[in-house]
Image (cartoon, grey):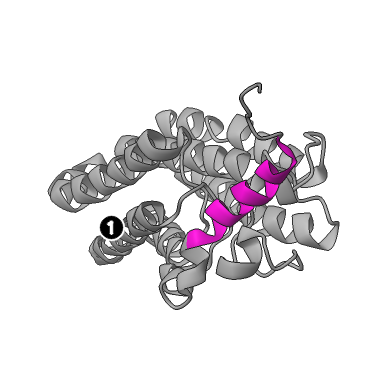
């Protein structure tokens, strides 16, 4: 996503958006959708526990649609808040975590045969999150294209499994998740401060000045500080 920030901002250089470029308000329509997705996701567990395969599938599709529209509404309504990307990532984690447990209840026999693929995806997700947490003190919210493709593949795999289909879409989805998490780790390594809404690591690699964007931003903000001087 592009933004119209000044040339000294991180967003201009890398296509990402810093927290300073977002609204500080919490109460927005997109944020409400994210909260609703997080709150409603555990209902998939209730439905799956009771063997309601169709109900679980319908609820997952509704939640997935909410994930599709919240970011677009944030841009269309000009309600891009600082907490929004983090809230969206949290809601997604809750939704897919509940989906995984629901699938275990409903298709546990098949998932048991694909445990290696699932384990690789989970480990890569945890590693990417821990890397960003160690460096920036927060989980990544880059929303790269590869991440969007990965979650789309996961959604397709989930629909296939909930419809009684084969396991190969799950394997493909887990592979794309690993690739997306590897890109997330690369972005974390290259950045000097956390940004959100980065389309790709190649946007950073293709513009060397983007790697110094956060340092420039810190220098600009630090320009108002009074230098330390010793008394005569």
The residue lying toward the viewer, choosing from 83 and 20, is: 20
Quadrant of the rendered image containing residue 225: top right
- Characterize the magenta stretch by its predominant secondary structure: helix
Residue occupying the point 50% across, 33% down: 47
State the quadrant of the N terminus.
Answer: bottom right
- Residue 142 in the figure: left or right of residue 132: right
- Residue 134 in the figure: left or right of residue 221: left
Quadrant of the rendered image containing residue 38: top right
Q: Is residue 108 visible?
A: yes
In x, y percent, where is residue 101? 36, 35
The residue lying toward the viewer, choosing from 170 and 56, is: 170
Quadrant of the rendered image containing residue 198: bottom right
Residue 207 position (above or below residue 65): below
Circle 1: element type: helix
Give the residue furthest to the front: 232
In x, y percent, where is residue 36? 68, 36
Residue extent of the magenta highlight: 212-225
The residue lying toward the viewer, choosing from 106 and 221, is: 221
Residue occupying the point 39% across, 39% down: 135
Residue 129 position (above or below residue 45): below
Residue 230 position (above or below residue 25): above
Residue occupying the point 41% across, 72% down: 205
Q: Which residue is mark 1?
A: 178
Give the residue furthest to the right: 77
Magenta stretch holds residue 200: no
- Residue 213 in the figure: left or right of residue 227: left
Instruction: Assess disc 1: are there few (<14), some (14-19) or many (≥20) residues with their C-alpha within 10 Å of its C-alpha.
Output: many
């Amino acid at each position: 996503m592009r933004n119209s920030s000044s040339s000294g901002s991180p967003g201009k250089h890398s296509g990402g958006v810093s927290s300073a470029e977002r609204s500080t308000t919490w109460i927005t329509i997109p944020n409400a959708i994210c909260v609703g997705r997080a709150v409603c996701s555990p209902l998939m567990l209730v439905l799956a526990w009771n063997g309601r395969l169709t109900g679980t599938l319908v609820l997952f599709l509704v939640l997935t649609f909410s994930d599709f529209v919240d970011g677009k509404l944030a841009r269309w309504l000009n309600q891009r808040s600082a907490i929004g990307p983090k809230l969206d990532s949290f809601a997604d984690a809750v939704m897919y975590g509940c989906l995984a447990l629901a699938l275990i209840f409903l298709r546990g026999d098949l998932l048991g045969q694909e445990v290696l693929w699932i384990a690789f995806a989970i480990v890569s997700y945890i590693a990417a999150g821990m890397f960003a947490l160690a460096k920036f003190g927060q989980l990544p919210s880059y929303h790269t294209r590869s991440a969007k493709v990965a979650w789309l593949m996961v959604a397709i795999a989930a629909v296939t499994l909930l419809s009684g289909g084969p396991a190969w879409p799950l394997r493909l989805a887990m592979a794309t998740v690993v690739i997306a998490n590897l890109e997330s780790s690369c972005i974390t390594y290259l950045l000097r401060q956390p940004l959100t809404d980065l389309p790709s690591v190649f946007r950073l690699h293709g513009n060397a000045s983007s790697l110094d964007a956060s340092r420039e931003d810190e220098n600009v903000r630090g320009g108002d500080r009074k230098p330390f001087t010793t008394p005569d």
